[in-house]
Amino acid sequence: MVDPDAAPITVLYIEDDAKLARLTARYLESHRLVVTLASSGSEGLLILSSSRPDVILLDLMLPGMDGLEVCRQLRARVDTPIIMVTARGEEADRVMGLEGGADDYLAKPFSTRELLARIRAHARRARGQTGPDRSTVDVGGLTIDPASRRAKFRGEDLVLTTYEFDLLRVLAERNHRVLTREQLVDQVRGSAEEAFDRSIDVHISHLRRKLGDDPKNPRVIKTVRGVGYILALP
């Protein structure tokens, strides 16, 4: 259910296929979203310098600066949710997109209804509207405040994407409990059906780096081989 009194979701769509961009924007705008189009990565970055959308849609195959480089530059500037949209749907391409900083991945041809649902889900998380539980989580030097969407570890602020924040929150709320990849995706995104084997692995890798965890011998987020992951804080 969409709250009619909520501020419209704003979207920056970076896509060089003008026809696809117009049709997609028209559909999203018919559902009260506000869409700004950019036909290249450089144009998208320029728009971002003067506005802050709720969600960024980014095509992987762009002229000049490719989508992966654009994604890296976007992520260096903002923590806005990035959904990569591309005709290249192989797992290796999806992993590359996630490693480049994307939060989500949708292969062409895509369902506009599914795209709309994902945009709304990411916008809700970014706005802190994911559920009724707003209590702070504090375990082993890690503090997560869902209300302000801020996280600290051992006194240092963590700079996290919306997906990373929610993934860390789920792990922290279940400290010392093993969670499968499917359980993590189900908790963070809302549907385990959209998971693929390495998507969570990439986000976990990002979290380990930001937590200062040793990737070869992790002590904060441990891998339970063949099962999933566990947050192992005191």
Image (tube, grey):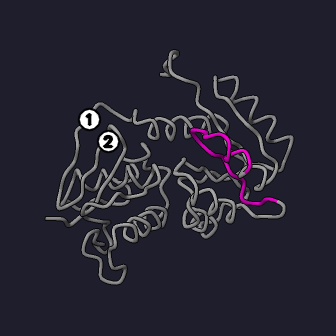
- At horizontal 49% and vertical 38% (from top left) the residue drawn is 121
Whole-percent x, y for residue 60 in the image = 71, 59
Q: Amino acid at mark 2?
A: Pro
**Does residue 14 lie above or below 224 as drawn?**
above
Q: Which residue is mark 1?
A: 133
Q: Is residue 199 left or right of residue 65?
A: left
- At horizontal 37% and vertical 58% (from top left) the residue drawn is 158
Q: Is residue 49 magenta?
A: yes
Q: Amino acid at mark 1?
A: Asp
**Residue found at the far top of this picture:** 5
Magenta range is 46-62
Question: How would you rate the neighbour count of disc 1 (Cα within 10 Å): few for under 14, some for 14-19, many for 20 or more?
Answer: few
**Does residue 194 lie above or below 190 as drawn?**
below
Whole-percent x, y for residue 194 in the image = 50, 51
In three-dimensional space, the C-alpha distance between marks 1 and 2, rounded to whole angstroms, equals 8 Å
Q: Is residue 157 left or right of residue 97?
A: left
Secondary structure under tag 1 reads: loop
- At horizontal 83% and vertical 64% (from top left) the residue drawn is 64
Q: Nearer the viewer, residue 138 or 103?
A: 138
**Does residue 163 lie above or below 12 as drawn?**
below
Q: Is residue 145 left or right of residue 94?
A: left
Question: How would you rate the neighbour count of disc 2 (Cα within 10 Å): few for under 14, some for 14-19, many for 20 or more?
Answer: many
Q: Which residue is mark 2?
A: 146
- At horizontal 50% and vertical 21% (from top left) the residue drawn is 6
**Residue found at the far left of this picture:** 234
Q: Nearer the viewer, residue 50 or 52?
A: 50
The C terminus lies in which quarter of the figure?
Answer: bottom left
Asked whether the residues under the numbered discs 1 and 2 touch, taking CB atoms below 8 Å apart as contact, a structural biologist would say yes
Whole-percent x, y for residue 198 in the image = 48, 67
